[in-house]
Image (tube, grey):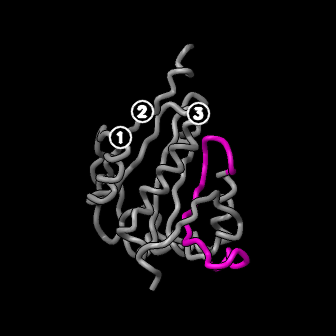
Amino acid sequence: MPPERGEVLVRAGVEADLPALAELYNHYVRETSITFDTEPFTPEQRRPWLLSHPEDGPHRLLVARDAPARADAADDALLLGYATSSPFRPKGAYATSVEVTVYCAPHAGGRGIGTLLYEALFAALAKEEVHRAYAGIAQPNEASARLHARFGFRHIGTFTEVGRKFGRYWDVAWYQKDLDRKDLDRD
């Protein structure tokens, strides 16, 4: 069992993170309605997803890991979670909008990992040409709704019974965060 508290390292996701990222995501695929994927992924299947999130630009992948006890043991640091900003839609006019998400490892609940990841993600996005951030939250998920509210997201609507998983239909509530980039609004 990992320690309750300790130093957490947040950094860009890299190729070496793929096995742990796939394992974490697959937990949510198999066990929850939080994602509407229904089949687990191999690390190789997740590689295009990882590569679509470079270290800079508006589409990021940040990982949180327990800081290793030794500098040469960085690969042994336990994955605590990850956050992404991805294209909201593929059409050009949507380029200044992103969809964001955060996933925390089941063993990392209550440690503030989601908050830490979103702080880092929104600090990075503040330097990019991003006007709006959107988050879709499968319902019910009070913890995610609280996290997003804490970061200034507001509920803008709910798609009812939009996904079917585990033999039932699920709603998705959509949230929006207005990113304060007045310097970009001069058009």
At x 46% / y 29%, what residue is drawn? 180
Name the residue at the bottom extreme: 1
102 is within the stretch colored magenta? no
- The numbered mark, 3 or 2, whose residue comes first in the sequence reads 3
The residue carrying pointer 3 sits among few (fewer than 14), some (14 to 19) or many (20 or more) residues within 10 Å by Cα, namely some
72 is within the stretch colored magenta? yes
Residue placed under numbered mark 2 in the picture: 178
Q: Nearer the viewer, mark 3 or mark 2?
A: 2
Q: CA distance from mark 3 to mark 2?
A: 15 Å
Q: Amino acid at mark 1?
A: Gly
Residue placed under numbered mark 1 in the picture: 152
Residue 49 makes an appearance in the image: no
In this view, the residue in front, 174 or 64, is 64
- The numbered mark, 2 or 1, whose residue comes first in the sequence reads 1
**Which secondary structure lies at badge 2?**
strand
- The numbered mark, 1 or 3, whose residue comes first in the sequence reads 3
Quadrant in which residue 50 is drawn = bottom right
Q: Which residues are magenta?
A: 54-76
Q: How many marks?
A: 3
**Left or right of 139 in this view: 18:** right
The N terminus, quarter of image: bottom left
Residue placed under numbered mark 3 in the picture: 95
In this view, the residue in front, 82 or 173, is 82
Q: Position of residue 179 (x, y in %)?
A: 46, 33
Q: Amino acid at mark 2?
A: Asp
